[in-house]
Amino acid sequence: MANDSRIKDDDLVSAAKQTRDKAYAPYSRYKVGAAVRCNDGRVFTGANVESASYSLTCCAERVAIFKAVSEGCRCFEALAVVTDGPRPAAPCGACRQVLVEFSPAARIIMENLQGDRAEALARDYLPDAFLPTALPLRESES
Ligand code: THU
């Protein structure tokens, strides 16, 4: 990998790691930090936010992606995810679904607090994904 890409990945992972500290996870005590890099270079971060009504919890990855999309970014080059565990953890199925809709080619960079790193492509993590093309939407509605 080119040195420049490695630095960009390291920066994205650092942003995810810092944001992990802001997780609101009093129920699971499992903090997750995420950061997406958009094709215009902007970076959006997210941490998981839990709720006393447990099922309302939102994962860190979706917080980051929704922040990006609501600021006008729909094309992601990379998503970094930082967790505390024996090995890097992959995004859950719901987050994979949301990511692949916008950027099937996005790289997912996963790291744990020990610095073990793993990488995958969004499309490889959700084969045969349900995509917007399955819906009878008109162009003006997208
Ligand atoms: N969580 C994430 O933030 N991302 C994932 O991909 C999987 C799980 C959060 C949700 C919940 O707050 C905690 O981790 C335990 O499931």
Image: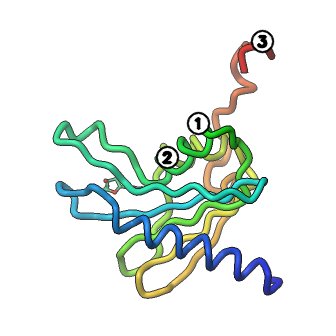
Residue drawn where x is 52% and y is 57% of the image? 45
3D distance between C-alphas at marks 1 and 2: 12 Å
Amino acid at pointer 2:
Arg
Task: Name the amino acid type tagged 3.
Answer: Arg
Q: Is residue 90 above or below residue 4?
A: above
Q: Give percent across and percent down for residue 4.
A: 79, 81
Disc 3 target residue: 138
**Is label 3 in a helix, a strand or a loop?**
loop
- Label 2 CB sits under 8 Å from any ligand 1 atom: yes
Q: Toward which corner of the image does residue 130 lie, by quadrant? A: top right
Q: Is residue 71 above or below residue 77?
A: above
Q: In screen coordinates, is 28 left or right of 133? A: left
Give residue 115's position: percent from left, percent from top. 49, 86
Residue beneath the point at 69% across and 18% down: 135
Disc 1 target residue: 70
Compare marks 3 and 2 and give the one earlier in the sequence.
Answer: 2
- Side of 141 relative to 29 (left or right): right
Q: Residue 62: which numbered mark, if any?
A: 2
Q: Nearer the viewer, residue 6 or 21?
A: 21
